[in-house]
Structure formats: structure tokens, C-alpha cells
Image (cartoon, rainbow, N blue to C red):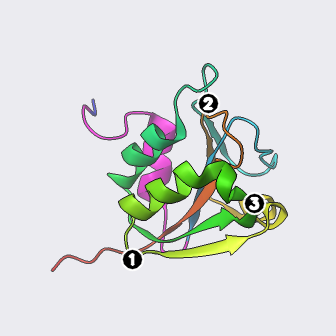
Amino acid sequence: MKDAGVLHPELARTLASAGHGDLIGLADAGLPIPAATPRIDLAFAPGKPPLLEVLDAVLEEFHVEAYVLAHESGEAAAWLIDALAQRLPGVAVEHVSHEDLKAATHGARAVVRTGEFRPYANVLLRSGVRFPG
């Protein structure tokens, strides 16, 4: 039995199987997720779990080379923009329209639905490679 890191079996399997350049989405409770895109639903109540708790757990096991945010995030999700900048210093960020971010979920390895209820609390994480040494 796994007793550290991400314990959710589907999320752990998805993170472990991601290859270089794959996208993993972290989404608020309202983001529409395409039927063909695997959904890992962690939401169990409004605000629970919060997106940042899920982000922190994912970052323990997932190397991010870049991430994608919606232009519309701006002031509405300044808390998320600041948190990502603190947790991923020097990592490239791409800004796209909210519609383009939603369209990009079609090609994601999975989208993780959180209980986050704040607007525009969505990010796509692009998998990188961390070589030892």
C-alpha cells in the first residue's frame, strides 16, 4: 500500500504515466471537461479540496516545464497566478483565451476536477523531464 505522496490511485497512475509534453489539467468545479478526456474527480463539497492543495500534492510528483493559464484569470484568479509563480519560479507560462484553454483540455492526459469555487481557477501543467545529475 502506498503511504506517501498522491494516494488517489487514478491520479497517481496518471502522474506516473505522463510523458514529456503531456498536459494535466487542474480545474475548478465548473470547468467543462470533454467526455473523451479522462476526468479525475476529487470534488466532494464546495471548496473541497481546494485547488492549491491538489496543486501542491501534484507538484511533489510531477515535473512541470510550462503551464497554461487563461488571459481572463487576471484579477479574478490573482491568488492562483501568484501561487503558481511562487511554486514554479522560472517556469514558462503561456496565456491563452479561456476558450482556448477549454479547447486544449481535449488533448490533455487528464483533467483533475477540484472543489474550487473561485472563477478561472484552471491551469494546464505541461510535463517536463527531470534527469538526475
Is residue 13 shown above or below 118?
A: below
Q: Which-is-in-front pick, marks 3 and 2?
A: 3
Relative to residue 133, is residue 122 drawn left or right? right
Q: Counting residues from the N terminus, which is met first, the one under dot 3 or under dot 2? A: 3
Q: Secondary structure at mark 1?
A: loop
Is residue 8 shown above or below 92?
A: above
Q: Which residue is mark 2?
A: 115
The residues bearing labels 3 and 1 have C-alpha atoms spaced at a distance of: 22 Å
The residue closer to the viewer here, 71 or 38, is 71
The label number, if any, that marks residue 112 in the structure image: none
**Percent x, y for residue 82?**
48, 57
Can residue 110 be seen by looking at this rendering? no
The label number, if any, that marks residue 72 in the structure image: 3
Q: Secondary structure at mark 2?
A: loop
Quadrant showing the C terminus: bottom left
Residues packed near mark 3 inside 10 Å, few (<14), some (14 to 19) or many (20 plus):
some
The residues bearing labels 3 and 2 have C-alpha atoms spaced at a distance of: 20 Å
Q: Residue at x 76, y 44 (%)?
A: 31
Q: Counting residues from the N terminus, which is met first, the one under dot 2 or under dot 1? A: 1
Q: Residue at x 70, y 49 (%)?
A: 120
